[in-house]
Image (cartoon, rainbow, N blue to C red):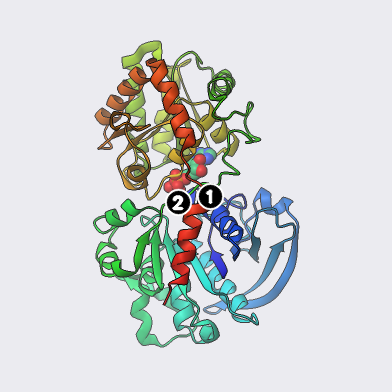
Amino acid sequence: MEIIHISAECYPVAKVGGLADVVGALPKYQNKLGHIAKVVVPAYDTKFIRESEFEVTYDAWANYGNHHFQYRILKERTNKLGFDLYVIHIQGLTDRPNVYGYGDDTERFVAFQIATLDWIVQWEHRPDVIHCHDHHTGLVPFMVANCIKYKPISSVPTVLTIHNAQYQGQFGWNKLYYLPAFDLWKGGLLGWDDAINPLASAIKCAWKVTTVSPTYLEEMMGNARGLESLLRQERWKSVGILNGIDNEVWDPATDPMLGKNYNIKTVEAGKLANKTALCNVFQLDPSKPLFTFIGRLVDEKGADILPDIFYTALQQHGDNINVLVLGSGDNWVEGRLNQLKDIFGGKYNVYIGYNEQVSHEMYAGADFLIMPSRVEPCGLNQLYALRYGTVPIVRRVGGLRDTVIDIGDNGFGICHDQTSIWDVTHSINRAVDFYNDKKAFKAVRKTMMKIDHSWDRAALNYIELYQNLK
Ligand code: ADP
């Protein structure tokens, strides 16, 4: 099958979160199964794009509404990613350092989607599936099925994967004219709650809807930022497929970002070497258990209660634990996390910002990774933690519920039910006891590292889903 993935993010081209990891891995594993999976993303001004070799495959003009723009499709030359990568350059719209966060994000992603479809519609052949990811590409299923100029590809099946329903990309009906012409009576397929809602539109128009874990699919029926009833209505065509991880990128035995590589046999020495190096950089004590958090500092991740959690835990455990945080997001949370450095220097540190290298070093050097998420569609951090022999401490929600089993149930993680300071500090107390039970702790590290969360299984699930599209 020929599968076209259209996305706003793709690792290592442009990454903000887990969406990039999925789009950077799933196509590779689909290709390994003998299919042809290609990826189309906007050409941002990122290091990867600046430093890679591209060839121009198509150059044309398009428009959203009466805005005329020139776009250029560039193909990565070396196939180093394991799939064909196409980036779409639209002068003044895509060529910016950040993926999101601009006042004209609507225009940027509408233009990107139109340019992508304008390009595909003039191919001599038809792809077998167009697979869209999240709201940034959510207008694609509607446009393919309904816009007059895309009639030649209107029978191509579209699939939507919801990586996070909290973000829906709404914009006003006054911008309806951005879209290419369609029969106006179909306009209802674009809207939800008085606005054009790309995610809702994709849920209505895609042939199949997938989410990134089975539990998240069920949770969305009751909590999806206003889309609950729509999701319940479209439940018949929805399925939860648990994400995998790219075992080639995330392998402690070969990871080039680690000071010391290790495998299941050398895990104790390997993790200690990485922990010591990390503790030296962040002025922490490698002889004490190291608790970490990696992620966006937003309420969804429970980041707002992190400062109080760490304050309470560090007060309670005195000099017996270390904490290291990597993340960026809410200014208020960043500020409070920074303040803790003054109170708990030598046992607490924080890196505010995005740093892929430090994240790998933390998965390898940490003893525990905390995820007190309120919403977690799949969560990749806990899967990376498992692969690197780091015990996840998670709230039982979404994909965390599907992937982490508590040590009390013969599992390998520490689980709690609420995103509350009490629940998480209680889990930290349990973790300290567990860390001191050296034999059990070592055994669990090995158990975790043996778990296979690679994309092989999930890539096949998606292929089966495509094959049954009707
Ligand atoms: P989400 O997509 O909701 O942010 P996921 O758990 O699905 O959460 O994916 C998060 C990904 O982003 C992981 O690969 C994680 O390591 C990475 N990440 C998040 N914040 C940072 C950061 N500040 N620096 C480096 N990597 C980060």
Above or below: residue 65 compared with residue 373? below
Query: Along the line of sight, which residue is nearer the eye, 223 or 27?
Result: 27
Above or below: residue 228 compared with residue 256? below
Q: Is residue 52 left or right of residue 242?
A: right
Q: Is residue 400 visible?
A: yes
Report if the CB atoms under discs 1 and 2 are less than 8 Å apart: yes
The x, y position of residue 283, in whole percent, is 54, 17
Q: Residue at x 37, y 68 (%)?
A: 203
Q: Give the amino acid type for the residue marked by disc 1 in the picture.
A: Asp
The x, y position of residue 442, in whole percent, is 45, 22
Query: Along the line of sight, which residue is nearer the eye, 421 or 235?
Result: 235
Distance from mark 2 CB to nearest ligand 1 atom below 8 Å: yes
Q: Which residue is mark 2?
A: 243
Q: Which residue is mark 1?
A: 21
SS class, disc 2:
loop
Q: First in sequence, mark 1 or 2: give its number.
A: 1
Q: Is residue 237 left or right of residue 276?
A: left
Q: Quadrant of the C terminus?
A: bottom left
SS class, disc 1:
helix
Q: Is residue 329 visible?
A: no
Q: Quadrant of the N terminus?
A: bottom right
Q: Residue 226, labelled with which disc?
A: none
Q: How far apart in space, not on screen, are marks 1 and 2 (Cα)?
A: 10 Å
Query: Along the line of sight, which residue is nearer the eye, 71 or 122?
Result: 122
Q: Give the amino acid type for the residue marked by disc 2 in the picture.
A: Asn
